[in-house]
Amino acid sequence: MARPVVGIIGNQHLINDQYPAHAGGAMNSEAVATVADCIPLLIPADPRFVSVAELMECCDGFLLTGGRPNVHPEEYGESPTAAHGAFDRARDAIALPLVRACVESGQPFFGICRGFQEVNVALGGTLYPEIRDLPGRDNHRMPPDGTLEEKFALRHCVSFTEGGVFHRLLGSRQVMTNTLHGQGIKSPAARVVIDGTAPDGTPEALYIDGAPGFTLSVQWHPEWDAANDPVSRPLFTAFGDAVRAWALSRRATPVLKTA
């Protein structure tokens, strides 16, 4: 069969601070195509152009990417402040109901950074606007200077639950990851299982309790060097396997019983 399709949730973007565009990092597409072995399809995350039902029909799985805009705090019952940064309400209007629909249907998704936070908010959780301002927490933001290699360098460990989903998948209770985020989970949603944390206690890995499909999501950026990184590769491979299984199940032709 043809490779299954992974919809990559894009972000609103202005080219030269003037020309509106929908954007998605090339490394997301590369990880989906070369490691997950699926067709990457950039989604304009705006309800004016697409609906959740249409996306679920034309895509086999979804990658909820990172991005500079944050989930609007009104989505989790708080008022916006300067610390909450920029927003993309159009993406909120697509990504949050899409997460809820996929959780119930079993259609696979993989959340990354903002996507990790979207999963929590979609199911009723809340976020901190700025992790580095909290007592005892580290600065998880991307280094302001340096090459891409330096910005995406491994900076802290993530510890997983003994015998948990991530421990079993990655074969280790501790891994090293990059860190390029300002916000983080404050209160996990009722069905969100925090399966990995940074040394300062920041949630870094989750899945949805009782969900019938692939719901793994991480706060770091595994799309960076995904083909070679020993943590990123199994995550994207497992995601691709789940997407292929979904695609096969939805394309299966029922066997007709004969008399």
Image: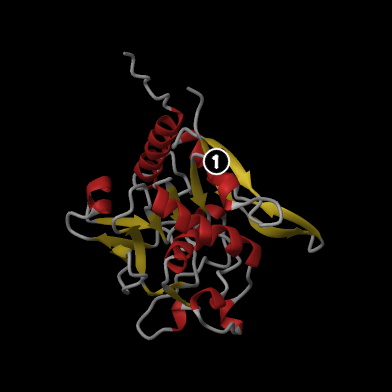
> Measuring 59% from the left and 58% from the top, which residue is drawn there?
94
Count of residue discs: 1
Residue 221 visible to the viewer: no
User: From where the camera sits, is residue 256 visible?
Assistant: yes
Q: Secondary structure at mark 1?
A: helix
Looking at the picture, the colour scheme in use is secondary structure
Which of the two residues, 47 or 140, is positioned nearer the viewer here? 47
Q: Is residue 183 left or right of residue 48?
A: left
- Residue farthest right in this picture: 18
Residue on which the image places disc 1: 57
- Report whether 168 appears left or right of 156: left
Residue 154 in the image: state x and y as whole percent.
Answer: 40, 57
Residue 157 horizontal/vertical position (percent):
31, 61
Q: Residue 26, percent across and down?
A: 60, 45
Residue 152 placement, left or right of 189: right
Residue 103 lies in quadrant: bottom left
Q: Residue shown at 29%/59% (left/top)?
A: 209
- Indicate the amino acid at tag 1: Glu
Image quadrant occupied by the C terminus: top left
Give the x, y percent position of residue 158. Answer: 31, 61
> Looking at the image, which residue sits at the far left?
163
**Which residue is at a point 53% across and 54% down the rendered structure image?**
65
Q: Nearer the viewer, residue 136 or 106?
A: 106
Q: Quadrant of residue 145?
A: bottom right
Identify which residue, 164 or 46, lies in the foreground.
46
Residue drawn where x is 43% and y is 45% of the image: 107
Q: Is residue 149 above or below residue 58?
A: below
Q: Work out whether 185 lies above or below 158.
A: below
Question: Alpha-carbon neighbours of circle 1 within 10 Å: few (<14), some, or many (≥20)?
Answer: few
